[in-house]
Structures are given as C-alpha cells and as structure tokens.
Amino acid sequence: MPDFLEAVRCPLCGGALTAVPGGGCLRCASGHSYDLARAGYVNLLPPGKKNNAKTGDERDMIRARSEFLRRGFYDPIDETLASALADHAAGETEKPFRIADLGAGEGYHTCRTAAILAQKLGCPVDALGFDASKAGAEAGCRLAKSLGFLEKDGLAAPPEQWTSPVRAAVLPGNIFRLPLADHGMDAAMSLFAPVPWEEAARILTPGGILAVVSAGREHLVKMRAILYDEVRLTDFHPAPPEDFDKLTLLSRRTVSFPVTLSSQAQIAALFMMTPFYHRTGDAGRERLGALESLAVTAQIELSLWEAAV
C-alpha cells in the first residue's frame, strides 16, 4: 500500500514528512523534526498552540466520552455517515480512500467510520483525525492500535509494515491550519465540532465530500428538560460564510435514534460530552445526578458538501 504519511505535511513549512529509520520521529526536507509519542502519534500543533489555554478536551472528558461511545450508544451516527460517504465515493479501489476527521476527539468515530467505509467500498481506507487535545490524540491512537489500525511503531512504521485494510491515527493539530497537503483527501468529516470550511475545501480532492454532523433540533430534549426550567428548540444548519463557493451543499437530512442509559455513570458520561456540561447550574446538575436511568432521543443533522471540481 502507499505510504500512510503521503498526505501529511509539516506545520511549520508545509513540506512532506517522512519517518526517520530507527529515529522514532518524522522529519521534513527543511529539517523540522517531530518526535513520536509512546502512543504512536506526533504532535503537529503549530508553534504557539501547544500550551494554548484552548487545547481541546481534558483527559477526564476524553475518558468519559470513550467509555460512553464504546458502549455503542452513538453507533448509528457512524453507520449513517459511512453509508452516505460510500454512496458518493468515486468507486476507485486501486488506492486507499483517504478521509480526515476534523475535531476527532478520542478517535472513536474516526476508527469506526473508516472500518465501515472499508467494508462498503471494498478498498483500503486511510483515516487521519486531528484534534487540539493531546489527550484525545493519545486515546485515539491507542484505540487504533487495539483495533489493528495502527502499527506498533505508530506513524513511524515503514510502508511494508502496514497490512490492515484500515489505517488510522489521531494527531494533535489545529483544524483551522491542517497539516495536510492540498487536495489530498477524498473526504472529510466534522462531528459536533466547529467546521473549518476553508481548510476542508483546501484538503479535499475535486469532487471530494465534506460530511458535517450537528445536533438536531430535538437532540437530547428530555435531558435538556431535566437540566433547565425552560427548553428552547432552535434550528441550526451549519453553513460556510456567505458567498463561499468552494463547497456546494448536496443534501441535508435528519436522523433520530433512541439512547437508553441504565446507570448514573452512563448519564454523567453523556452529560460531560454535551455543551450543557458548561452551561448548567447546580439545580439542574442535582436533578440529573439523582437519576439512575434515562431514556432519551438523539437527533443529528447530516449535511454533505461537495468540493469544487
């Protein structure tokens, strides 16, 4: 298979990165070097961002979300997303289908969507996730390794070692300044995260697809009714800036599915994953904390955007 790193670029100069044999690092032709972490990733956050206060989710939030997602509560999202991307894929099977996850968090959706895509397309899939959280990248790469999607040596593994039809990694990186080559990705996805429209258009191949998953109007409305005295239902449709012509809306659909939580730990984990976690007062937290079970409806909006040809 082609080198997994072909699409990755140095965040300093934009040069291609290659693994240094036996060096445990990636390096560009200009000499910029990035050490390989034990989990298998390299930190590609641009200078000045590594210690920024806004560096993604904290480790406890990553852990809670990982536990929640691995129980399969949100699996319908990955199935819907992978099916939509497969329907719009060009159908080429000679080279890996490349997808970037913009705001990948702990990498669960990155890995699972890639695995479903590989089955549907019948070809290898390379998935690269990017997130400002170092803890998220660490969790994502550990998950990829456990699934056989990332080699023991991580991104420094030579091409001949990559044998799985799915190759995946999550890297610390700024999604608004992606360390990726121009027009090198067949698809990109953004789940419950800010959408870097300009960067998405830059990295996609002509005709490539950006899939955006956002909360629907009635997403977790029963939980919101417990947390707040008044629940306001509002429509939100992610869209690029006005007159942005590099991406064209292809479709928009709403998908709903039930989520049944059977313990306070599961309820708390879902709560920590939502924006409500930082917007809820003590009274709402106490009401939610008193529950030992909760049945809610998750609702997402999936919009597909095509890169200009």
Image (cartoon, grey):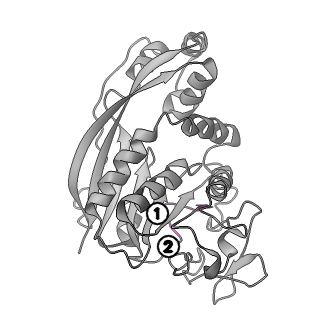
- Residue 141 screen position, x and y as percent: 65, 58
- Front in this rendered view, residue 131 or 165: 165
Main SS of the magenta part reads: loop
Q: Can residue 204 be seen in this view?
A: yes
**Label 1 secondary element:** strand
Q: Is 6 left, or right, of 199 in this rendering?
A: right
Say which residue label 1 marks: 100
Q: Do the residues labelled 1 and 2 touch (CB within 8 Å)?
A: yes
Q: Residue 13's quadrant in the figure? A: bottom right
- Residue 286 screen position, x and y as percent: 60, 11
Query: Considering only order in the chain, which callout, 2 or 1, is on the residue closer to the N terminus?
Result: 1
As drawn, the label of residue 180 is 2
- Disc 1 versus disc 2: nearer the observer: 1
Q: What residue type is labelled 1?
A: Ala
Q: Residue 137's quadrant in the figure? A: bottom right
- Front in this rendered view, residue 99 or 223: 99
- Residue 97 screen position, x and y as percent: 41, 70
Q: Which amino acid does label 2 sit on?
A: Leu
Q: Residue 61's quadrant in the figure? A: top right
Instruction: Find the magenta span and give its range.
Output: 169-179
Q: Is 250 left, or right, of 61 in this rendering?
A: left
290 within the magenta span:
no
177 within the magenta span:
yes
